[in-house]
Amino acid sequence: MSLWEYANPVKFIRTTDKVLPWVWALTGICLVTGLVWGFFFTPDDFRQGSTVKIIYIHVPSALMAINAWLMMLVASLIWIVRRHHVSALAARAAAPVGAVMTMIALATGAFWGQPMWGTWWAWDPRLTSFLILFLFYLGYMALWEAIENDDTAADLTSILCLVGSVFAVLSRYAVNFWNQGLHQGATLSLDKEENISDVFWFPLLVCIAGFVLLFIALVFLRTQTEIRARRTRALLAREGQA
């Protein structure tokens, strides 16, 4: 079985209809378990106090904000190379989800930064690149809405996605590029010495799994909606020509 078979809109909808209930169930389990565990069964940090518990929302949302754009990049490249409509529509479907994740990351970062840095906002390299990434999300969605022809919109938004990927990468690695920023280094790392304490680390991993599954579920659902909307527009256009 080839992965490209799912570029068929009918097969995509049928498959995701079967998968979605399981994804939603796992999403609920992971989010409820991770957030309850993190907020109610972990201690306060000796420096940050209870403020540290924002990590269970901030880190997963920031992670998904970046990876949502990278998923859009992959889908856009598939559209450019193979002209599969499902990939273009999946990129379009992911954009609002990624934008909301970015907005959550910015908001929770402000609430976390105020008691730690004494300010709600600082022109830190990572914060600035995240803000620019959010603006790219808005621009990407606006461009889709501004162009009537779906194929032309897919072409132009794919180019915009390629450009915006620079800021997605900067959002992830800005701390490494500019050491003078206020933002801390990576909370999770393949280097065990750089990870946070296990008492925070394990519930955080569960929360991240929940956010990943939530993103997958929402993108599947929204892609189905985009496919059906495209079909409806095509049918209306045919009726108008008849």
Image (spheres, rainbow, N blue to C red):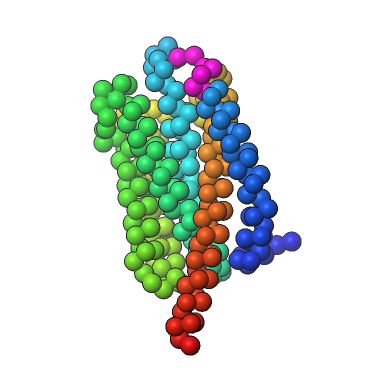
Q: Nearer the viewer, residue 128 or 95?
A: 95
* For residue 180, side relative to residue 205 (left or right): left
Image: magenta residue range: 38-44
Is the residue 15 above or below the residue 242 in the image? Answer: above
Who's the residue at 42% across and 29% down the image?
Answer: 185
Is the residue 82 above or below the residue 168 in the image? Answer: below
39 in magenta:
yes
* For residue 109, side relative to residue 214 (left or right): left
User: For residue 157, what is the image quadrant?
Assistant: bottom left
Q: Is residue 54 visible?
A: yes
Q: Is residue 205 visible?
A: no
Q: Nearer the viewer, residue 197 or 17?
A: 17
Is the residue 167 above or below the residue 238 in the image? Answer: above
238 in magenta:
no
Q: Can you give x and y, in whole percent of width and height, for residue 51 in the image?
A: 39, 20
Q: Can you give x and y, in whole percent of width and height, for residue 81 in the image?
A: 53, 68
Who's the residue at 48% across and 42% down the image?
Answer: 64
Who's the residue at 62% across and 44% down the image?
Answer: 23
Q: Can you give x and y, in whole percent of width and height, for residue 37 in the image?
A: 55, 22
